[in-house]
Image: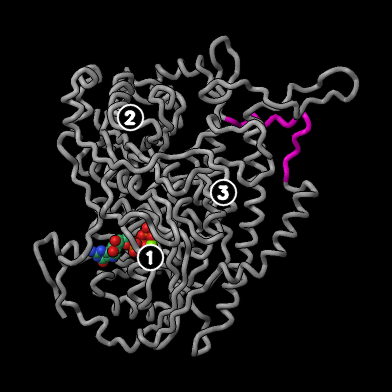
Amino acid sequence: MFRAISSLRSPLRVVLPQTLTTSSSISSSSLCSNPNLLSSIKVPFDHSPPLIFSNPTAPAISIFSSPFSTRQKNEDPYDDDYVYSREPKSPPKLFVVQPRFRPDEVLNAKLSEALNLAHSLEEERDGDFGFQFGDKELPPHIIVQNPASRSSKTRADMYFGPGTVDTVKCHLNAYLSEESLMILFLLISNYKLQRAWGKPVLDRVGLIIEIFNAHAQTKEAKLQSELAALMYKKTRLVRVRGAGGRLTFGETGEAEVVSARGRGSGGRGFISGAGETELQLQRRRILERRNRLLTEIEEVRRTRALQRASRKRRGGSEGQGLATIAVVGYTNAGKSTLVSALSDSYLYSDDRLFATVDPLLRNVILPSGRKVLLSDTVGFISDLPVQLVEAFHATLEEVVEADLLVHVIDSSALNVDEQRSSVLQVLQQIGVSEDKLQNMIEVWNKVDLLRENAGCDEFVDEGEGEDEDDDADAEEEEFDEEAELSSKESLKEDAMASGLSAGENLEPVDDQEDDFSEGWETVDEDAQQDNVSKGLNSMDYQQVESTESSKIINPDSHFQREDVQRVETSAVMGVGLQELLHIIDEKLSSKKVVERRSVDCFDRKWRPPREVDAGAAVEQ
Ligand SMILES: Nc1nc2c(ncn2[C@@H]2O[C@H](COP(=O)(O)OP(=O)(O)OP(=O)(O)O)[C@@H](O)[C@H]2O)c(=O)[nH]1
Ligand SMILES: [Mg+2]
């Protein structure tokens, strides 16, 4: 069977406009004074509606909104919506600031991913997105000098040197309206940059978490995304020592003490505490909400465990357990498309990154007649935010507990090696056993694009799909986790209500002893000046190092094993699917299948990998 490849929708491929790649060499003064220069830089952007903050009725929780600017003094601290919400119908405008990397292939891969991430942020409505992904214009972007080059002009507090800060500001003023947001990749968000640029600054981690929030549909995914957003927010609360040494909170320098909570008069005419500061208030609320979310997520986790056990008991036609195969891989590798093709069912797939946030199970009948479950799950990304890994505990446990893993790799990706190694690292870090990693099947997907690039317009379909009877018998079964959860909801709500009314799980806040500022990021401008001479602060280095290192980790160094079974597929063309099903069949029936065992993968604190190669090539 012949099929034309040209009919396929190819994934987003970013071609860097020449004007952009040279933009970092434009001095800020010449840029600001020369309008022609500005207009020569291609900044495509539509006039989509502006972001609206603080809509108290909107259910979506956003980390975009700043606690500094949207704090409502009289809000009910126990109101679930106290964490600032935004209007879900308004996808934010983003402007991407991409530090330059060498060589150009690395820069292209990083920029492509950055733009794709920024592009992917859109609220899902009624199970659909407002725009076709391919119809959207790329967000405006600029490439700037990489601060990791540690030039003498680099400022520890601003991350970038003053020239770069000014250049970016000129672009922002020229292209973005007041409501627009900006995203800054590869570094921590920084309130001083926010102040300098007059825009909220969001880092890559924050954007990824925000995309999860926007794309989550089921209750489970929403809970976990919100938890990740909360934890991200918590680490971004800052206290600043401003002029005169006075401690203030956030960019606007609001007064620190905001309530009398924590003051103990004891009726004896003296004050024993200084009151609750804005930081303490914000942190206390985050912790309270976190505890409530954790309670609900724990319930989800228990329900999932029960469902797994019941699936296991139900068994297949020959008495074996109903095996679960987790389909894992980098985001956009084609996992959902593959699961759809194998199970002859429909799963949402799109070029948007993190199109799938809610895990789904599909029935598949293997060539031997054995029935198994394919689990389509959330995609990974390099330097996966720790907040997400920790919050998505319940979802990732499905991967850890699966009988077999199928790793889908986008063989046409610019940075395919980096993507592959990132996934392997995440799998290791969430607690997948070494045996399971060895037994994993590697699916090199999108081979049609490789062949397309090699100049072939068509290729022979190897006949997969001709024997459609096998698949036709595959009874589609979607495990509606929501429905199964609903029967438990009343119980859960009762438990939560009683727990909260009894004050359990809430941190005490009555005494001065409970100093909620402990462990908070305190920015002391004097101390920061010391860091200027040393270059960037340690957090900045960590971010940069981990990002730069991710491109140079040799994926083959640790995972190159002769027995790793690889199969080439094109999920959209139906190529390689039968071969894959046969391999799954063999693996499950052979003794190689690793015994299911419970691994508590989150006992230890997960941290992003830090492999650094001295050969990292960064522009100096
Ligand atoms: N050309 C080509 N495109 C493919 C193939 N498989 C998937 N795609 C496309 O790649 C894009 C991403 O596919 P998905 O199935 O959503 O990828 P995913 O891994 O589930 O992505 P996330 O859920 O976002 O992690 C979609 O536009 C698919 O149509 C393939 O074999 N060839
Ligand atoms: Mg998917």
Q: Residue at x 58, y 66 (%)?
A: 598
How many other residues sit within 10 Å of disc 3, few (<14), some (14-19) or many (≥20)? many
Which corner quadrant holds the N terminus?
A: bottom left
Magenta segment boundaries in residue numbering: 506-520
Name above or below for residue 578 compared with residue 174.
below
Coloring basis for residues: one colour
Is residue 405 rendered to the left or right of residue 500? left
* Residue 607 part of the magenta segment: no
Amino acid type of the residue that numbered disc 2 sits on in the rendered structure? Ala
Residue 133 x, y percent position in the rendering: 30, 55
User: Which residue corresponds to mark 3?
Assistant: 227
Q: Amino acid at mark 3?
A: Leu
Query: What amino acid is labelled 1 in the image?
Result: Tyr
Residue sitting at x 26%, y 46%: 137
Q: For the residues carrying marks 3 and 2, which lies nearer the camera in this image?
A: 3
Looking at the rendering, the quadrant in which ligand 2 lies is bottom left
Q: Residues within 10 Å of mark 2 (few under 14, many from 20)?
A: many
Q: Are marks 3 and 1 in contact (CB under 8 Å)?
A: no
Q: Left or right: 385 with respect to 296? A: left
Residue 76 figure quarter: top right
Main SS, magenta region, reads loop
Helix, strand or loop under label 3: helix
**Residue drawn at (38%, 65%), measured in percent from left and top?**
348
Compared to residue 490, the image places residue 159 above or below, namely: above
Per the model, the C-alpha gap separating discs 3 and 2 is: 31 Å
The quarter holding residue 577 reads bottom left
Q: Which residue is mark 1?
A: 348
Looking at the image, do the residues carrying marks 2 and 1 touch, with CB atoms under 8 Å apart? no
Label 1 CB less than 8 angstroms from ligand 2: yes
The mark found on residue 148 in the picture is 2
